[in-house]
Amino acid sequence: MKNSHPLQKARIFVDNKNIGMYNFKNDYAEGAHPLILNKLAESNLEQELGYGEDQYSAAAKQLLRKAIDNDHAAIYFVSGGTQANLLVISHFLRPHEAVISAKTGHIYANETGAIEATGHRVITVTGAEGKVTAQDIEDVMQAHRMRPHVVKPRMLYISNSTELGSIYHKTELQQLQQVCKKHHLLFFIDGARLGHALCASSNDLQLQDIASYADIFYIGGTKNGALLGEAIIFRTAKLADDFDYSLKQKGALLAKGRLLGIQFLTLFTDELYFDLAKHANHMAEKIARSIQAAGYQFLTAPVTNQLFPILPKQLIERLLHNYAFYVWSAIDAEHDAVRIITSWATDPAVVDQFCVDFNHIDQALKAGS
Amino acid sequence: MKNSHPLQKARIFVDNKNIGMYNFKNDYAEGAHPLILNKLAESNLEQELGYGEDQYSAAAKQLLRKAIDNDHAAIYFVSGGTQANLLVISHFLRPHEAVISAKTGHIYANETGAIEATGHRVITVTGAEGKVTAQDIEDVMQAHRMRPHVVKPRMLYISNSTELGSIYHKTELQQLQQVCKKHHLLFFIDGARLGHALCASSNDLQLQDIASYADIFYIGGTKNGALLGEAIIFRTAKLADDFDYSLKQKGALLAKGRLLGIQFLTLFTDELYFDLAKHANHMAEKIARSIQAAGYQFLTAPVTNQLFPILPKQLIERLLHNYAFYVWSAIDAEHDAVRIITSWATDPAVVDQFCVDFNHIDQALKAGS
Amino acid sequence: MKNSHPLQKARIFVDNKNIGMYNFKNDYAEGAHPLILNKLAESNLEQELGYGEDQYSAAAKQLLRKAIDNDHAAIYFVSGGTQANLLVISHFLRPHEAVISAKTGHIYANETGAIEATGHRVITVTGAEGKVTAQDIEDVMQAHRMRPHVVKPRMLYISNSTELGSIYHKTELQQLQQVCKKHHLLFFIDGARLGHALCASSNDLQLQDIASYADIFYIGGTKNGALLGEAIIFRTAKLADDFDYSLKQKGALLAKGRLLGIQFLTLFTDELYFDLAKHANHMAEKIARSIQAAGYQFLTAPVTNQLFPILPKQLIERLLHNYAFYVWSAIDAEHDAVRIITSWATDPAVVDQFCVDFNHIDQALKAGS
Amino acid sequence: MKNSHPLQKARIFVDNKNIGMYNFKNDYAEGAHPLILNKLAESNLEQELGYGEDQYSAAAKQLLRKAIDNDHAAIYFVSGGTQANLLVISHFLRPHEAVISAKTGHIYANETGAIEATGHRVITVTGAEGKVTAQDIEDVMQAHRMRPHVVKPRMLYISNSTELGSIYHKTELQQLQQVCKKHHLLFFIDGARLGHALCASSNDLQLQDIASYADIFYIGGTKNGALLGEAIIFRTAKLADDFDYSLKQKGALLAKGRLLGIQFLTLFTDELYFDLAKHANHMAEKIARSIQAAGYQFLTAPVTNQLFPILPKQLIERLLHNYAFYVWSAIDAEHDAVRIITSWATDPAVVDQFCVDFNHIDQALKAGS
């Protein structure tokens, strides 16, 4: 990472609920990378056009078009993932059309029915490790033949990395793109954690690949160092036709669009975006190795910044004294799966301490104390 | 104003379109008040809970409850005005219910049918100076008696200050509150420019008055010194029942809610919010006096930071060489109304120069040159 | 009229509210033309395919295609006018698009916000005599240029005959079609009372003209002799693409589609549809002549089966003793406009009696008694 | 059955597709019970009020209130089941609220996303035999605790009989009512085939029981002898508050409401409704016995008018030469499940012939020919 680590001067926040605790609950516990704040301060009193017509948004879009190697892409910045998802899906689907997602997909599991609120069904598939397969799509198409008594599948939604921390590989995306073309489905990739996926050690995809497989995708800023912001990218301007209306109608068009433009301009200068994702993944990897070394399994292979280890309940309980994370799901009488997330801002010293604490507690418990 | 003016160190941005121009088009051309950026930087690496559960949002809400003298108010922060409007209106209205607005109201004139997109009609009244009167409400109720063939009016929406720069007075709000109670209408005030309204020289309302007349209202940050953000205030927690679900569903729940909390905490510390609005109004007043002194009329009385003078087309054309503003509406063969907006960040020196330029051009034209 | 009048054997229904009264309130007070009931009985126990795939619907569509001289038209039958309107409009409009209508248009004035409930604004124009002009469209387009802050007009909706009983003439429809093409608007004609329009004495349009000017229109059965039913006609099959899904989704696809098919088959055999409309118009004309002969004016010229005479309040009051009709609007201290509607089933003897009663009362009042 | 069978004088319709075939595909292949047509003809030229305010609708509602032993019930008639479902669900749910259904429930499997089109998620449970259990509800509530990131379950939807021909028993409904009360869920029963459920030999429920367990339910006419029509019944008038607006807005308010009133008045006079359901069930029972006697199993126990026998593919193929029915689902290489439906109008002679043919073919196949 080119920049000195932002947490060197950080202090860990102490509030009533989490006295002295370090938060591994999510990747949006801190603010923004300091370079972003610097740029905001530096440009603060320049007068800019509103509603995304500012020079910083224009420059950021130009940088992104270069990064994906597609001069014809249309790009819009919005505040967050739920907003990006509902905007894209409602913009494309006609009233009787539906979107396909894994049951664990963010649009089905975490967004309060945002898609249905725009009038469309989310058709779910079970999806191993939170992923959708080409066969899943074939099954959905097969199950939706009784026209007009059924909804018409029209879009595939996947997240990469997924909500379970897993990632898609090149052959998988190729197959999904093919099956989408075969069935006239739009292919939409939620990249709220795209950086973490593309920086995973097992990854075989480039940003340009994502841009070539997906009809529409977005690059998440909120979970990788921005205050807020996702960059929605349409393969062609024609695809994005009238999307400006949708942005405004759904309350997503910020008056001070510079706030989003400046952030993506900063994140995509000198590959900061990928450096931040690598840091998060690297922190997770250290934790994962400690857990694996102690002989524990994971719900999904630990490859990005989200870990789902299956641990003894007693071990979990003691860790929770000093570290905040979610107990994810019950496994058996003695074990639960938990979710541990690292971020661009995770303090390496804390991670080291966590590994030490983990081993210490684990060994004590194994020793029967 | 307690703080030295933020524009003292500013430079005027020069781009291709507006070389050397100063922008009077809106009140969101600049970033945020420097104290906000300072606070963001200062707190940047503290770990906070997400989705508005952070300490800054909590502290800002406490401050606002004190400012409106209502301990029971429920408060939520969102990114912008369109979002605030569609959230509040769609949260309260049942499918057959409608909201009443002036035809110039932001929800009817400027938000791409955002309310209708949630399923509800906006019933418009003509509204002198962009304002709704109690009699307008009576007329609407009278016109909607043919149940069930008509929509059911259920909410009144007004903006203060209005989209035409005018403001409501105490007796007007009292009458509107009464007529709303009479007809079982919820009373919702859009305060995107509430600061400018409450700091107008002709104003006779306090923030507490707004909070006591309205069932729901919001205090706009975006147009008065914040990067983004509006604080939606419900008179009681019961009124806000389940509003958290709506926030999430409509894509309005920011992961890093601290961004909004910190801004409102800053704006409502030491009355910064009102100082900024006073500055904007004061800048507008200087311009208005020059225009009045030259003998010109206004579409609506110039009392806040939005001015709508009626000027000769030739005068407008020459002013546009150095200053950016909107030509608002055609008046007659020789005159148009224009819209000039000042902000918390408007440079006093530029305003002085504008007045000099205005007089110079006006006198030259009157002299026939 | 080829068939003996259906009311010859009728008895006037007497209920608690309207003892001995004859109902001129609407054109759906009676059931269906007897030929329809006969056909229903005759075919009753034949087994037919459901959901509009029956032979009667197929035959009726064939008949209608011939009547409009367009083999390529796609046709769907639905239960009523509000259903037809919301189906067509919501099927075609994307989320940010809007439909233009006269303020008196059924979709704005009489359908409980059905269009807005599907997410779309109805943009209203004042419309003399309930009609929209080409200039109205130009004005709307002019007022909706501030993209993306405004809705995008995408469809024109008119009714012929209108809700005020007026009709469109050929040059008017030609101009509307041209302005629609110019601005890329779909042209949709609500023909709930199309029969009455086309049989008006001042009419210069044929059914084929309607079909050639409109992109989509419907022929109303409910108000012209059917139990229920409107035939929605799309100029091409391509225009109707996926409309079957919309029908089902909005609850408009009747399991026993034969009910609709049989009615339109009957109505369009031997021109029954037009005979019924002529009867309704003829009955109205007799009443209109009496009123005109007595020197009274009308809100709109009396040319179809809806009359809006302006009468002295005393005269109205006395007529209401024996005849049911709506008092429509206040004119001045002494006069109101009323609405009198005749139908395919209006009894000629009652109309004669009404004229006698009208003259008698009028003369008595004029004589001061 | 008090009336001679309506099919005695019927002829079997012959069209190109189904020459000489008898249709067991559904229970809406024929028109209406002759008594309904008689009543329509008899009352045809009486003048009635529109929009459900007619005397027949009033009388039918009175009869229904008596039949369910609840004077306080509010009742509305609509055209069909999808319409009834979307009306009730969208009327009650706030934007973030969802309805729970079996995955085979009509609102999820057969209505083109009608509920989602009104903005609400349908949460599905697997449901043995198409039924929902109290435990299913507990599981759903457990899975929806992460407020506000999930939808809020607010209503339970079940159908009785179900889409798989199964029925609910008294203890099941009692348990569902209890779990609904516990979790503040509205309990809504789709009775499109309620007659068939209540007339099943294994049934232990009365119509009054249904009315006491459900907050809202409807009695289906379309699938039991009416041309069209479902009677929606709300336990109290308060529950139905403003439902008239929803009816009109969704295009469900028929101008000639008499058409629906007359049908329910006829169906609930002298228990015709139940006689018709008994006939349908009896016809199915005869077929089921033949199939059982031949040693075949069913997907669900054959208790109502929908049968789902699992048959050898060769047997199915030969039966399809003379009888129309749906092949429902693949079982194994040699067997499919089929769906056979009988109705109020099914001809006993045809059923007898079917049983003869079935046995003949089956024995021939078993004999290897």
Image (spheres, coloured by chain):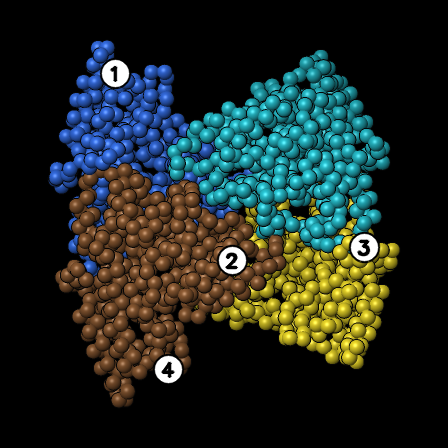
Chain colours: A blue, B brown, C yellow, D cyan
Q: Are marks 2 and 1 on the same chain?
A: no
Q: Nearer the viewer, mark 2 or mark 4?
A: 2
- SS class of the residue under badge 3? loop
Q: Which residue is mark 4?
A: B334
Label placed on residue A295: 1
Residue B69 seen in render? yes
Q: Nearer the viewer, mark 3 or mark 2?
A: 2
Task: Give the CA distance from mark 2 to mark 4.
Answer: 47 Å
Quarter occupied by the N terminus of chain D: top right
Q: Residue D317: horizontal and vertical position, in percent?
A: 67, 25
Q: Residue D208: horizontal and vertical position, in percent?
A: 68, 31
Q: Which residue is mark 3?
A: C13
Image height of D87 relative to B1, above or below? above
- SS class of the residue under badge 4? loop
Q: Nearer the viewer, mark 3 or mark 1?
A: 3
Please identify the quarter of the rendering in which residue B345 is found. Answer: bottom left
Task: Give the CA distance from mark 4 to mark 1.
Answer: 85 Å
Please identify the quarter of the rendering in which residue C317 is found. Answer: bottom right
In-image side of B43 versus C253 (left or right)? left
Q: Which residue is mark 2?
A: B182
Quarter occupied by the C terminus of chain D: top right
In-image side of D329 versus B59 (left or right)? right
Q: Residue D81: horizontal and vertical position, in percent?
A: 63, 39
**Can you name the residue that lies furthest to the top here?**
A368
Tell which subunit mark 1 falls on: A
Q: Are marks 2 and 4 on the same chain?
A: yes
Tell which subunit mark 4 falls on: B
In-image side of C214 versus C38 (left or right)? left
- SS class of the residue under badge 2? helix
For disc 2, the neighbor class at 10 Å (few under 14, some 14 to 19, many from 20) is few
Tell which subunit mark 2 falls on: B
Q: Amino acid at mark 3?
A: Phe
